[in-house]
Amino acid sequence: MRIKSFLILTITLFTIWVILNGKLTPEVLLTGGLVAIVVSLLFCRTCEVFTEIRLTPKAVLYSVLYVFVFMRELVKSNLDVAGRVVSPKLPINPGFVEVKTKLHSKIGRMILANSITLTPGTLTVEINDDRLFIHWIDVQGGNIEKDTEMIVQTFEKYLEVIYG
Amino acid sequence: MANTILQIAGGIMLLSLVLSLYRFFRAGSLVDRVISFDIMTIISISMIAMITYTSGRAIYIDVALIYGLLSFLGVVIVARYLEKSL
Amino acid sequence: METLKIIGAFITLAGSVFLLLGSIGLIRMPDVFTRIQVGTKASTLGTILSLFGIGLMFTEIAGKIFLLIIFILITNPVSSHMLARAAHYIGVKKADITVVDKLSEFREKQPENNAQKPEAE
């Protein structure tokens, strides 16, 4: 499985290198390829982060869908926050709530936490196994199940397919 | 036309920079200061990108890239320091 | 070509408005956590929009702009999460209107775990 990690890291680094250079001459490709392979070999001796990514067609499709869902939530979140900021009464009702996630892989949880941070009124403060502590600018739920349903499930159904 | 709109956008960014600076000086705690500094950095990244366009020199966008990288590292280091785990 | 530039300029303008809203939020919000929320969210979308607009106007640097957008999308939530965590850890004063704090309850239950957590990662 380490081969997969190595390959994903190499390809990512190489793509970034090519975009940064902006041209496709042989020496650029050669240098970038060599450096990407060496760096991946150095840093990927023990890494298991990328092994949890599934590369089935369904997972790829859901990754693309996820980007769109995420963009929609990002715009929604910003309009929501902007409305709160400009409204003269400052309608906030902040609090720290706890939610549970069904994801097991590290990278899946990381992406879930990141997505929660960028979506309407929520900010991941602490993560401990499957318990996420979230600062919510407008607390509505009351118990863990209800909060989980409101905050996590939009993303979880996509991430579950991609990372498990 | 496009340049006029860009000038207005630059003015708005400058105004938000000043507002963040106000919070930087009137901060309640250290964390407040770090947040306003972070936001000032992010606004600066947009302004550097704008300067790249107006001056027409593509090399300036590299400054923005490195600036973003350094600001992220700075915030992470301050956060680790506050948690006494540096 | 000229229309593309005008569209790009308008997108940049929209981004700068979001940046301004973020700064206003920074001043109006009552405590650290709400400031982190408003600051991060508004400034992320604001920067993305401005950079996207500039990318439309100046297509030579579109690749680097794309990388910068991806980079900001990844790092901004991480840095705000770390700041919020540190703020909660050192016990920054919360606003009086905070309704519930499950994290403090959680930390009080396991104090020994609390001290070691940063090394455990």
Image (cartoon, coloured by chain):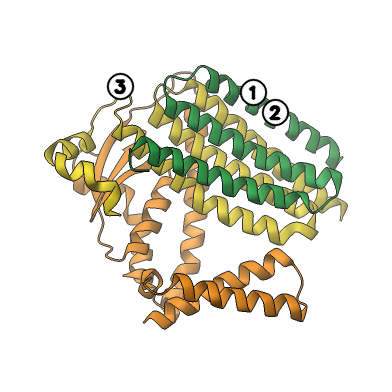
Q: CA distance from mark 2 to mark 1?
A: 6 Å
Q: Determine contact: label 2, label 1, CB under 8 Å.
A: yes
Q: Answer few, some or many: residues within 10 Å of disc 3's Cα (few below 14, many 20 plus, some between 14 and 19).
A: few
Query: Residue C54, relative to residue C23: is it above or below?
Result: below
Chain B: drawing colour: green
Tell us which disc is closer to us: 3 or 2: 2
Numbered label attached to residue B14: 2
Q: Nearer the viewer, residue C56 or B24?
A: B24
Residue linked to disc 1 = B18
Image quadrant holding the C terminus of chain A, namely bottom left
Residue C53, how many percent across, how many down?
72, 49
Residue A14, how many percent across, how many down?
61, 73
Q: Nearer the viewer, residue C112 or B17?
A: C112
| Residue type pointed to by label 3 | Ile
Q: CA distance from mark 3 to mark 1?
A: 28 Å
Q: Nearer the viewer, residue A101 or C70?
A: C70
* Badge 3: chain ID: C
Query: Residue A31, relative to residue C36: is it above or below?
Result: below
Query: Secondary structure under badge 3?
Result: loop
Q: Which chain wears yellow?
A: C
Q: Which chain wears orange?
A: A
* Badge 1: chain ID: B
Task: Note whether residue A77 is visible.
Answer: yes
Tell us which disc is closer to us: 3 or 1: 1
Residue C25, how many percent across, how many down?
51, 27
Numbered label attached to residue C97: 3
